[in-house]
Image (tube, grey):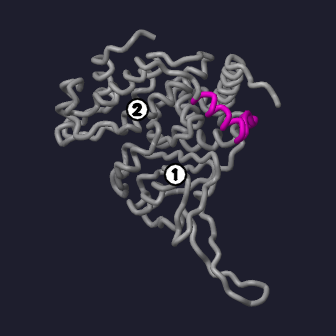
Amino acid sequence: MSEPIPVEQQLAGFQNDFDALRREIGKVIVAQQEVVEGILTAVVTGGHVLLEGVPGLGKTLLVKTLAEVVQLSSKRIQFTPDLMPADLLGTYVVMETPQGRRTFEFQQGPIFSNIVLADQINRGMPKTQSALLEAMEGGTVSVSNETFQLPKPFFVMATQNPLEMEGTFPLPEPEIDRFFFKLLLGPPSESQMDQILQRTTEGEPPIVRKIVDSPRLLDMREIAANVPISPELRRLAVLLTAATQPDHPQAPEIVRRMVRYGASPRGAQALVSGAKVRAAAVGRSQVSAEDLRALAHPALRHRLILNFEGQAENVRPDRLIDEILEAAAGPSP
């Protein structure tokens, strides 16, 4: 019977693998460091990610590169208004046996993959978007009277364009809440644009190597889950989440005026789980207040439902979270 690996050694291995994943993706993706770290954090914890950005910023390329460096199978689903739930999940088809008998056999859809890229998810009809709910929550798919297990690990990486309105359908609140993070991709600077041109118009595209496999990814998830968090910091995570509710006593005045519904307990779970990964990624053996504050925006921004006044004034959820962070007096890191 082998002896357990010391915690310090586990954290060192976690940090090395996380850094290697970040560097390898950086060979292909220029800048967007915060987005890359957010995706890796979600992948380690087993969460799903919603990527929002205008076309041409490399959202699809980022997901494809991720699948290569973590040695996982990936499928791309292009969401369109005519896409049906069976096109995602699969369906029963009639098959003929060698003896000439006909039987029904389930043909798996593209959702049966480790990483599913739901490209332009807001272009799908609501009933098609809802087909992802069970898969994102429990890692299963129910068709007819049978339930099928999805491969483990299982991640949904969805993209959407914030500028499009015609031909799009807003994501239902239950589905939005199932996304661990919502990450925003901004436009590159001039120097970053120059790097993109060098990599894409001169010579061969960079080749990435495989860093971790599925068992190692699950090991990293367990290591991060065991990073301790103090009761004081856990209460800070609760406070940050609760302060997004307009009727909470600690909610800032702007939240009371602009927000209809705040974040659910999943927001607090994302804060704590993500903070543990962030701590382990730099080799720290415990969570700090800075870890929680750094992840407040990606963990909470998509969980704030604005009221009519907030929508009319086009208030950014990040501005509301800034106010919450300023008002929350947490322990020092």
Answer whether residue 11 is magenta in the image: no
Residue 21 % position (x, y):
67, 30
* Mark 2 surroundings within 10 Å by alpha-carbon count, few (fewer than 14), some (14 through 19), many (20 or more): many
Q: At x 69% / y 39%, what residue is drawn?
A: 70
The front one of 112 and 140 is 140
* Mark 1 surroundings within 10 Å by alpha-carbon count, few (fewer than 14), some (14 through 19), many (20 or more): few
Q: At x 31% / y 18%, what residue is drawn?
A: 328
Q: Name above or below for residue 280 compared with residue 205.
A: above
Residue 224 % position (x, y):
59, 28
Give the side of residue 75 with respect to residue 255, left or right.
Answer: right
For residue 219, what is the image quadrant? top right
Q: Circle 1 sits on which residue?
A: 138
Dot 2: element: helix
Dot 1: element: helix
Q: Which numbered marker is on residue 175?
A: none
Q: Name above or below for residue 323 compared with residue 157.
A: above
Q: Circle 2 sits on which residue?
A: 268
* Region of the chain picked out in magenta, as a range: 203-225
Q: Of label 1 and label 2, which has the lower sequence position?
A: 1
User: Which residue reaches farthest right?
Assistant: 1
For residue 62, what is the image quadrant? top right
Residue 319 % position (x, y):
30, 26
Three-letter residue code for mark 2? Ala
